[in-house]
Image (tube, coloured by chain):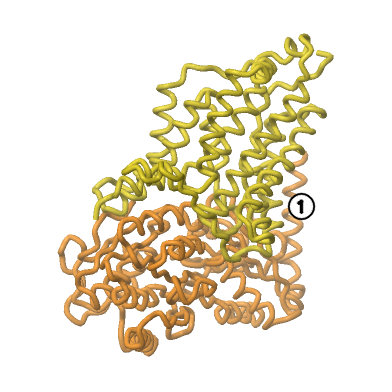
Amino acid sequence: MDINPILLLAAIMVASTPILLAAIGELVVERAGVLNLGVEGMMITGAVCGFIVAHSTGSATVGFIGAAVGGALVSTLFAVMVIFLMTNQVATGLALTLFGVGLAALMGQSYVAEGQIIVPKAPIPGLSEIPVLGPILFRHDLVVYLSVALVVLVWLFLTRSRAGLILRAIGENAEAAHALGHPVRLVRFLAVMFGGACAGLGGAYVSLVRVPQWIDNITAGAGWIALAIVVFASWRPGRLIIGAYLFGGVTALQLNIQATGLAIPVEYLSMSPYIATIIVLVALSAGRAPGSLGKPFHASS
Amino acid sequence: MKRRTLLATGAAAAAAAAFGLPARAQDKTKVGFIYVGPINDGGWTQHHHHSAMEMVEHFGDAVEFVYQESVPEGPDAERAITQMALGGADIIFTTSFGYMDPTINVASKFPNVKFEHATGYKTADNVSVYSARFYEGRAVQGTLAGHMTKTNTIGYIASVPIPEVVRGINSAYLHAKKVNPDVEFKIIWIFEWLNPAKEADAAKALIEQGCDVILQHTDSTAPHAAAKEAGNVYTFGQAADMAEYAPMPRISSIIDEWAPYYIDRVQAVMDGTWTTTNTWDGIGAGMVGIGEISDVVPAEVKAEAEALRDAIAAGEYHPFTGPINKQDGTPWLAEGEVADDGTLAGMNFYIEGVSGDIPS
């Protein structure tokens, strides 16, 4: 039996969504000049919060909202430390990941092996009937559409709005933006919380849709992939969506190729998602990092 | 430099304390476990922990129990095992294949501590190995899978390419083929023991390609969830019963029963009769359990699978009985010949009919 391209492409959209969500959040954080390496920790916190909330309320929608809130809450820890206490961003981010993984395991203890919550599919009327494109693009759950919409909104926000311009200015040169009277710390704080909420949503997509159940360490490194994709996409939303779908796509494709028994050594197939993503994004990339990325800001300096 | 000296002195003192006072070991035996996953992974590690707890219950106050979970295979394992040995453990069970070399290395530094390594093959004066003949359980699964598949396509989520996993694939295939000559296996390697997202993706890919029975050698229940969503797909519990997915999609399981072995070995340490052993037990000795075959399976198929299970347990039938050819068509076992343990332990080839290559 051969690979069915329609089913495969639809599976790719599902496999890519968690990474896409986490990456678009981190992109905004980094454009504001903050480097948050805690994406994995925020994702897994979101995954467990989403699962717990969805279970207690019986509603997947409330679960996703809970995940976003949970992700945003742990990210405020990071925000307070790096923005107000001016701790080292790299170390604090790594600590946030370790903390998040542990916290999630603790919170999820009594939810292991609990049954799943069904997340309803939401086919878009009309569009889902289009041959080929319909089943690939328009027969998913709401979160998939939301993730794509979010990328477009972030792009519009960054390039077409005054607030986006201020955020970018703060990321490029925090001192200059401060001198112009822009609230550097407030904007950064909100950006970090947005990143946390997005990572939380991405984590919940793993625990509520993709797997779907709660198991310790369920995100298994997806947050690190999201971080890498932000950098390789040179901090641009358009490239980011290419990178995330490419990574998810080659991941799903390589599993399918293995199953068909094509004579390609499995080792090469397993590394192919990483290699393909790196090659394409490096070939595309011409951008550079935001000027103030990772540098602590204090009004006195 | 000073701190290092201090640490070394501390280590020496701890070692001296452990070795110098054998009397201390007698009032309370300290038993340590190193786990590869979290103790609630629903599969491999959970069952080791469960068995360990049974052992602790058996001995009550006579043992002191310590464990460390989610220890990565590789250099970090050596640190974790060393720490446990320094902590005064009398016997340490290292419960994953990848702990093999770290266990041997640490054991050479602590000659008075006993080590038990699961699923490996390297022994020493104070290192025993133990494993279960999971391929016996795979024979039962293969029989069930061959009968239950309607598309004649069976998916297999393989973890890490070591002999144990290859044996499982061969045994399952052999017995599926026996009851259903048209059967075909699709194998996906994920190179990890536990990665729920990858396991789910692999299960979905297999289902999309027409598999309606999925066997797994990975530890999480994620493939069961994927099968449940798809509807008409059957799965098997791995390491633990995974009964929460019975009667559908999970129709049976292989359960690891380590408790009797653990009780036995800890008792041997207490009695001072511990010697290096190489244990490899199967269904007969109770180390491999076959989980309840659910009612979704037709009665005559269930009876056939149970008969096979009982024949293996009684030693009347060996899952690898000739004639069997290797994948390239060269003969391996002649008519009626039974595979020897040496070949099985190092099995690195597929049998005839399995497609694809084993990753090296």
Up-down: is A55 above or below A250?
Answer: below
Q: Where on the picture, by quarter, is residue A171?
A: top right
- Give the crowd class for mark 1: few <14, some 14-19, many >=20 residues within 10 Å: few
Residue at 77% in and 13% down: A178
Quadrant of the frame with the C terminus of chain A: top right
Residue A83 position, x and y percent, is: 77, 27
Quadrant of the frame with the N terminus of chain A: bottom left
Q: Is residue A78 visible?
A: yes
* Count of residue discs: 1
Q: Residue furthest front?
A: A126
Q: Where on the picture, by quarter, is residue B254?
A: bottom left
Q: Amino acid at mark 1?
A: Gly
The residue tagged 1 is B10
Residue at 62% in and 28% down: A28
Q: Is residue B6 left or right of residue B156?
A: right
User: SS for tag 1?
Assistant: helix
Pick whichever, B52 or A1, lies toward us.
Answer: A1
Chain that appears yellow: A
Q: Is residue A300 left or right of residue B30?
A: right
Q: Colour of chain B?
A: orange
Residue A245 position, x and y percent, is: 44, 37
Q: Is residue B85 visible?
A: no
Pick whichever, B258 or B19, lies toward us.
Answer: B258
Up-down: is A94 above or below A119?
Answer: above
Residue B271 position, x and y percent, is: 65, 82
- Mark 1 — on which chain does it sit? B
